[in-house]
Amino acid sequence: MKKKIAFIINPISGGINKEKFPSLIGRYLDRNQFDVEINFTRSAEHNVELAQQAVEQKKDIVIAVGGDGTINNVAKYMVNTGIMFGIVPQGSGNGLARHLRIPLNDIKALQIINKLHQKNIDAGMANEHFFINVAGAGFDAHVSWMFANAPKRGFWSYTKITLNEFANYKPQVYELVVDGKTITRNAFIICVANGSQYGNNAFIAPQANLDDGLFDISIMKPFKPHQMPIIGLEMFLKKYNNSRYVDALKGENIIIKRAEKGVFNIDGEPIMMDKDIHIKMLPEALKVIVP
């Protein structure tokens, strides 16, 4: 019996045209294995509707075609359902796909789906918000907010915003409670990572593991402007967790307290959240198709 598979495609993610993607599905997905349904999203709300519909229809497999935001909006409805979740990366950074070694090439990503290799991975909740890859406060959340409202998507737009905003951003004081232990830090970024990178091979938590039941917490200390290239290089060389500018911790139950409510980064999407954020682990929450 064929497996019922639904594709949920974000037509605008990553600034990539996906009009021809259904034809690739027709050519490279094994139709002897799958009964295929293809849907393009019209909005974030429609994305949610399609994901919920796939669960209600008891699909065997649901594939998100888009970036980390699209992946989040689909995957959260697959938690603990037994439905296999797949990814065809089509975003600006593709952090989760890169961590999982899912090819960025459309054809190769579809061929991975044909093999149906899977693993169970962890996820997280930040207050009422689901995330798979990274969540956090500080400069990265601020840049995500600016990027979400930028006229252009893509790597170079993100880089330009990062450089422009860096000079004026002020670190904040945070109180963190990690598995019952309280620490206070003046920080440029507080990142709670399930996966290892933001995207584009910028490794915020090089040692992170998606199935160890723990978050990797990276606290970037305040630094001078001339030190930014060093930190960037350490991030791309997977040496960030050993940097003198970073405190690296692990934990499964985390509370972040700040002076006031503000923007928070959820898998690359900026969300306004309360000043106190409770982050908890959802162990082995998703069945994900991997190479």
Image (cartoon, grey):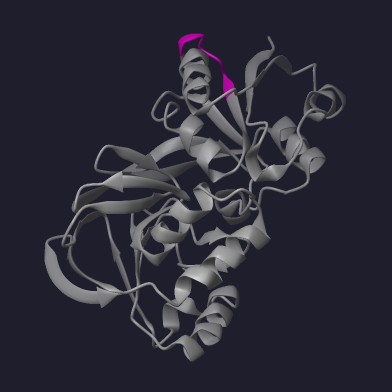
The quadrant where residue 5 appears: top right
Q: Position of residue 233 (x, y in %)?
A: 58, 81
State the residue at coordinates (45%, 62%): 208
Q: What secondary structure is the magenta-colored segment mainly?
A: loop
Please state, as top left, top right, bottom left or bottom right, where the N terminus lies in the image.
Answer: top right
Please state, as top left, top right, bottom left or bottom right, where the C terminus lies in the image.
Answer: top right
* 20 or 96, nearer to the observer: 20
Residue 223 to residue 125: above or below: below
User: Is 71 placed left or right of 130 in the picture?
Assistant: right
User: Is 152 placed left or right of 24 in the picture?
Assistant: left
Q: Position of residue 275 (x, y in %)?
A: 19, 53
* 266 or 282, nearer to the observer: 266
The quadrant where residue 4 appears: top right
Range drawn in magenta: 56-61
Residue 197 to residue 150: above or below: below
State the residue at coordinates (64%, 46%): 91
State the residue at coordinates (39%, 41%): 284
User: Is 106 placed left or right of 117 in the picture?
Assistant: right
Residue 61 to residue 129: above or below: above
Counting the numbered discs, the total is 0
Q: Position of residue 183 (x, y in %)?
A: 16, 72
* 8 or 216, nearer to the observer: 8
Q: Position of residue 134 (x, y in %)?
A: 43, 54
State the residue at coordinates (30%, 74%): 171
The quadrant where residue 179 appears: bottom left
Residue 115 lies within the magenta run = no
Residue 198 to residue 281: above or below: below
